[in-house]
Image (cartoon, helix red, strand yellow):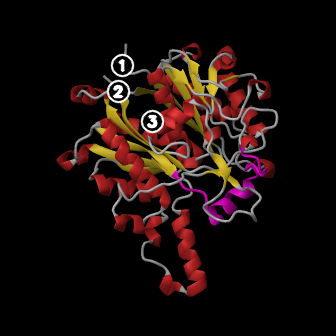
């Protein structure tokens, strides 16, 4: 019998909440944390809004020496992981650490740490570059630090598929569970709000360049004009179902289906991320995830969208839903809570999975912030204004990454739920 992978612990660090339940309360209320960038003076940049994690203090969960050796995105991961492990009730690893792995998604890496060190190099010389630059920026930094901090010595890895990475990390974790690993700590975080990071994002042409936070990130609307960057993310404990059952811990959701596809990079300079041409690959991923879960389109109760916030990208996503779900695409409720926190890149899909799991738990699909029904310009049932109360058994989460990555994951109501 195939081993089943379930979620038993969630940990969140997000612009709208300092922990998982605070984030969920704000998300259900449709609150937005989009505002002017405060981490640095962004007045000279065309994009000046973001979803920032304010008043973040990792000192209570992370040793001072580790804080000094690592970047903010790793600090987010360490704090979110400590919350996920505590929520799952996993005991100290000890000898069991060999049966617990770590997989994270990564995108821009430790860019803030790297910027500081590069500025020291340019202004003062190589003698002033710290010894931790080589490990703090590295894409696997968070995976390594999580493994060391929690003595998790099972299968470990890092997935670098940008915005699709959170789903791909969960797919990797489920594969490890099926091959005999007892549990995997997985998810993704991002800290892309700094001069260097913002400079790297601007050429893609998908960032909102206006000044009004209420108009900044409005996916699937006729005046959609881009997204804003966001920071934070989520970590989760994925566990073998029988192990969770034997431990007597609550199961939040089952990873019922997962698939990924690759569209390839775009030759169109106006579509550097490949969003406009992503429909076939995304449809293939959705269809693969449904087949993997043994479901038909009519079984999908709701969709948590990728929602780039660019007209061509949003249209391609809707087209992918039409191809994969047929008539169900126009009737299944769709939501994009990331419009209230920003596009978190490697942390975004992981946070969307947390949103889907909590929606299943509470029977409530959160609204898309800053959007009203009259603004919606696509043939989808976009949830706006208030949360949609309805029983949820199967929720589809979809995500795309810059350069042609496309992934889909189906979360199912827990096996032992009534």
User: Secondary structure beneath disc 2?
Assistant: loop
Q: Pick whichever of labels 3 and 1 is earlier in the sequence.
A: 3
What's the residue at 53%, 22% (across, down)? Answer: 364
What's the residue at 50%, 34% (across, down)? Answer: 24
What's the residue at 61%, 44% (across, down)? Answer: 33
Labelled disc at residue 415: 1
Labelled disc at residue 251: 2
What's the residue at 41%, 68% (across, down)? Answer: 68
Quadrant showing the N terminus? top left
Alpha-carbon span between mark 3 and mark 2: 16 Å
Labelled disc at residue 16: none
Q: Which residues are magenta?
A: 190-213
Labelled disc at residue 21: 3
Alpha-carbon span between mark 1 and mark 2: 8 Å
User: Secondary structure beneath disc 1?
Assistant: loop
Query: Around disc 1, counting alpha carbons within 10 Å, would you say few (fewer than 14), some (14 to 19), or many (20 or more)?
Result: few
Q: Position of residue 87 (x, y in %)?
A: 33, 37
Q: Pick whichever of labels 3 and 2 is earlier in the sequence.
A: 3
Query: Around disc 2, counting alpha carbons within 10 Å, would you say few (fewer than 14), some (14 to 19), or many (20 or more)?
Result: many
């Amino acid at each position: 019998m195939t081993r089943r992978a379930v979620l038993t612990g969630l940990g969140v660090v997000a612009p709208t909440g300092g922990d998982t339940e605070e984030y969920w309360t704000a998300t259900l209320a449709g609150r937005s944390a989009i505002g002017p960038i405060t981490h640095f003076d962004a007045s000279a940049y065309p994009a000046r809004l973001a979803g920032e994690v304010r008043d973040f203090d990792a000192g209570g969960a992370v040793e001072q020496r580790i804080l000094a050796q690592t970047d903010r995105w790793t600090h987010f991961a360490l704090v979110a992981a400590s919350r996920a492990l505590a929520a799952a009730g996993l005991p100290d690893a000890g000898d069991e650490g060999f049966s617990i792995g770590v997989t994270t998604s990564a995108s821009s890496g430790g860019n803030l740490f790297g910027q500081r060190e590069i500025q020291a190099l340019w202004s003062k010389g190589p003698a002033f570059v710290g010894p931790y630059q080589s490990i703090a920026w590295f894409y696997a930094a968070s995976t390594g630090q999580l493994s060391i901090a929690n003595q998790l010595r099972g299968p470990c890895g890092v997935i670098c598929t940008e915005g699709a990475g959170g789903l791909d990390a969960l797919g990797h974790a489920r594969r490890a569970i099926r091959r005999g690993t007892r549990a995997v700590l997985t998810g993704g975080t991002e800290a892309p709000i700094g001069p260097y990071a913002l400079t790297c994002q601007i050429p893609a042409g998908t960032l909102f360049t206006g000044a009004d936070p209420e108009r900044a990130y409005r996916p699937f609307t006729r005046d959609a004009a881009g997204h804003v960057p966001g920071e934070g993310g989520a970590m989760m404990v994925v566990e073998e179902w029988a192990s969770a059952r034997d431990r007597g811990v609550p199961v939040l959701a089952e990873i019922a289906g997962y698939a990924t596809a690759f569209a390839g990079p775009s030759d169109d300079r106006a579509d550097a991320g490949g969003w406009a041409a992503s429909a076939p690959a995304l449809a293939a991923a959705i269809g693969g995830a449904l087949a993997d879960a043994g479901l038909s389109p009519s079984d999908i109760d709701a969709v948590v969208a990728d929602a780039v916030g660019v007209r061509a990208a949003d249209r391609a996503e809707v087209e992918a839903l039409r191809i994969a779900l047929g008539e169900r695409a126009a009737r299944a409720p769709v939501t994009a809570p990331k419009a209230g926190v920003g596009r978190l890149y490697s942390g975004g899909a992981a946070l969307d999975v947390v949103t889907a799991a909590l929606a299943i738990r509470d029977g409530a699909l959160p609204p898309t912030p800053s959007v009203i029904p009259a603004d919606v310009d696509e043939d989808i049932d976009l949830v706006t204004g208030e949360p949609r109360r309805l029983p949820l058994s199967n929720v589809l989460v979809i995500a795309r990454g810059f350069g042609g990555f496309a992934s889909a994951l189906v979360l199912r109501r827990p096996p032992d739920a009534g």
